[in-house]
Image (tube, rainbow, N blue to C red):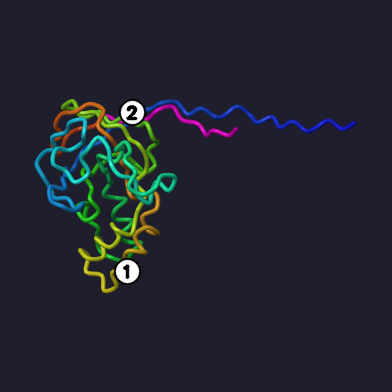
Amino acid sequence: MDLPLTRFDPEPEIVPTRKLSACADGVYAALSDGFVTQAVDALDLDFDGIKGDFHAGATRRSGGREPWYPRGTQMRNERQISIVAADEMAAIARGMGISEIRPEWIGANLVFSGVPRLSMLPAGTLLFFKNGVTLKVDSQNGPCRIAGRSVADHAGMPDREAGALAFPKAGRRRRGLVAWVEKPGRIATGEAVSVRIPEQWIYRP
């Protein structure tokens, strides 16, 4: 009688925690009816996010990113803050064939420098700002056509819908991160940030 084969997977590789240093080179808020942001001197944050910002709130309504819920379902707002890096935005612009993408056009709240491949920081990364604020990274910010249309409009692309389609392709894994407020306070332009990356592994059942 043949016995069933048993698969023995090796123990997962554990990547230890580490720290990086970053700088918040720019701070932005969406203080009007839309998601497009504008440069400000500082951001005042409470547990709902940036005070007066378009994405502020303890909860939000689900959309296309959450197909497991009926659209419009009230859920936890883990997208209070949008963080991007200038080098990744420049790479997206090259991929779209335009000269630049400004953080305001895609609704960014923070522009970081000093972190290679910012968009690849894992969920759970903690961002400790020098003046006391702590943000917790939830996930990558998936590029969408809405932001793509904004880029196309601001960059003066002749075909708006082509720009809307090009942005998700060029922006994949470069669009930055979304985070939520773990410890409120004020973030100022040029503030130093300590980036604490959690222990990581690949889970294979």
**Image point 25% across, 39% down: which residue?**
80
199 in the magenta segment: yes
Indicate the amino acid at tag 1.
Glu
Is residue 72 toward the left or the right of residue 189 in the image?
right
Quadrant of residue 199 in the image?
A: top left
User: In the structure shown, which secondary structural element does the residue marked by tag 2 occupy?
Assistant: strand
> Looking at the image, is 90 positioned above or below residue 182?
below
Please, what is the three-letter code of the amino acid marked with disc 2? Arg
The residue lying toward the viewer, choosing from 158 and 45, is 45
Residue 1 in the figure: left or right of residue 121: right
Tag shown at residue 196: 2
Position of residue 27 in the picture relative to residue 160 (left or right): left
At x 18%, y 53%, the residue is: 34
Q: Residue at x 32, y 47 (%)?
A: 72
Position of residue 6 relative to residue 88, above or below, is: above
Mark 1 sits on what residue? 161
| Magenta stretch in the rendered image | 194-205
Give yes or no for contact between labels 1 and 2 (Cβ–Cβ under 8 Å).
Answer: no
Disc nearest the viewer among 1 and 2? 1
Q: Give above or below for 63 relative to 1.
A: below
Residue 174: percent from left, percent from top: 36, 50
Q: Earlier in the sequence, mark 1 or mark 2?
A: 1
- Would you identify the image quadrant in which residue 98 lies? bottom left
Asked if residue 25 is among those painted magenta in the image, a careful observer would answer no
Prevailing secondary structure of the magenta residues:
loop
Give the quarter of the image for residue 183: top left
Q: Secondary structure at mark 1?
A: helix
Q: Quadrant of the C terminus?
A: top right
Locate residue 117, reporting x and y percent. Answer: 36, 44
The image shows a total of numbered marks equal to 2
Residue drawn where x is 17% and y is 50% of the image: 37
